[in-house]
Structure formats: C-alpha cells, structure tokens
Image (cartoon, rainbow, N blue to C red):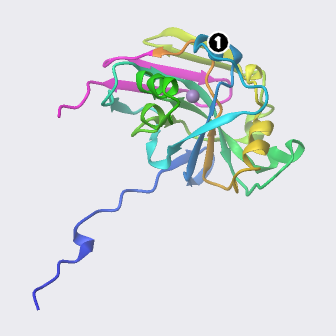
Amino acid sequence: MPDTPSTALLFTVPPAPSVAVVGEARRYPVNRIFCVGRNYADHAKEMGVEVDREAPFYFLKQAGAIVDSGATIAYPPGTENYHYEMEFVVAIGAPARAVPVETALDAVLGYACGLDMTRRDLQLQARAKQRPWDLGKNFEQSAIITDIVPKAAFGVVGPQRIILAVDGVTKQDAHLSDLVWSVEELVSHLSRYYHLAPGDLIYTGTPAGVGPVVAGDVVTGSIDGLPPISLTIAPAEAV
Ligand code: MN
C-alpha cells in the first residue's frame, strides 16, 4: 500500500473571526454580518433611490470579512470605485427569535463603529441588472470594526454624532437619531427571519456623503461614546 498523505498537511485552519469587547477578556466570535441598506434618508437620496418605509432590507457579509480598526489593507481587486461607508454596529448578545420591538434591546450586547467598505461600481452594476450585491459588498477585508462597547456603558441610542473623514477632511456627518429604522426595529424585524444569536453583527447603514478612497488615504471615523475607527488604504497587490 502506498502511503496516503494526511489531509491535515494540506491546509491550515484560519483563526476564527472575532472582535474585542471593552472590559471583557474574551473576544466576541463573529458568525454573521447583517448589513442594512438605505437606513438614512439623505444617503438613499444621494444614491438616487428612496427609503423603503414598508420594511428594512439587508445584505450579508461573510464573517471572515472582519478587520480590526487600525489596519492597513490593500486596495481591493476588481474595482475602480472603492468607497467608505461609516456605520453604527450592533452586536447581538443573546438569542432572539420573533421578539417584539419593546423587548428587542434585551438581545443586544453592545455597539461598535464599523466601515462597510464597498466596491461601488460593482454594486451599482448589480443593482442595475437586478442581481445580488455580493461582488460589490461581500468581499475580503470589507467589514472594519472597533472594539465593542457594552450597551449599558453606551446609553440610549440617538443623540450621538456619527462622523467620517478622509485624510482629515470630513465627508459624513450625521446623528444616530437620523436612522430610519431604529436598533430595536432592526433586531425585531431580523428576528422574524433568523434565529439571532451571539456572534451576529448588524451594520445599521451609512449616512450621506459616501465617496471613493485611493491608495494612501487614511479613513477615520467616530461615534460619540465608542472608540474611534481608522483604516489605511495601501496600493493594490500585484498579480
Ligand atoms: Mn452600508
């Protein structure tokens, strides 16, 4: 009998995606990344579309797309219009299935700053052809996130300012009270379609002012009460 190589030698297991939690030794294991579309009226307008007042809509990113704030990442392949989107992120901390709006916050562990990095040209091409957005939205290193701040330490969601700058020039400036669908409404609505559980993140959408970044740009963002977020764009990798 010839020796059969052990399959264990043929691959390595990547580390499980996770996020730090302020005041907590354990990291938060990321399972699903839900992203809300068109959740600020001014951003929907700049994209040439209307907010759907009937119900929120979502797309997902793979858990492995998570990148810690402070990273330097290469300009991604396949795009000539790579955009930032500054977002308020909700981390689910308890199981939730078909929960009412009134108790939906019970399922929330805390909040973080996030960047929903987007290949805008590919997203818009897909949108025009009524195809899924995966090429535009769900790609490697496309979900940047800060440490998670526990819900109690953050307080009531609403008055906090959400800001993004590129190389120090402010591009997005809004308040969380501008969210069309609130955290409670999003958790309640998603819980009618999924068994929400710890590991589920919700990127709640971006305000107006989205735009492109190029190699060498430094993106910084902040939301009152959360650690600031930053991202540096490096040249595209050679192929
Ligand atoms: Mn987004």
> In which image quadrant can residue 219 be found?
top left
How many numbered marks are there? 1
Rendered-image quadrant of the N terminus:
bottom left
- Which residue appears farthest toward the front when viewing the image? 129
Q: Along the horizontal axis of the image, is 220 left or right of 73? A: right
Residue at image position (26%, 24%) is 235
**Residue 38 belongs to magenta span:** no
Q: Residues within 10 Å of mark 1 (few under 14, many from 20)?
A: few
Ligand 1 location (quadrant): top right
Q: Along the horizontal axis of the image, is 25 left or right of 143? A: right
**Residue 236 belongs to magenta span:** yes
> Horizontal and vertical percent for residue 57?
67, 35
> Horizontal and vertical percent for residue 226?
63, 31
Towards the viewer: 124 or 20:
124
Residue at image position (58%, 15%) is 47
- Which residue appears farthest toward the bottom when viewing the image? 1
The segment highlighted magenta reads 212-239
Rendered-image quadrant of the C terminus:
top left
> In which image quadrant can residue 111 be found?
top right
Residue at image position (51%, 36%) is 132
- Which residue appears farthest toward the top when viewing the image? 169
Residue that carries the numbered disc 1 in the rendered image? 45
> Horizontal and vertical percent for residue 103?
87, 47
Towards the viewer: 121 or 159:
121
Is the residue marked 1 within 8 Å of ligand 1, measured from its CB?
no
SS for callout 1: helix
Residue at image position (18%, 31%) is 238
Q: Along the horizontal axis of the image, is 186 left or right of 136? A: right
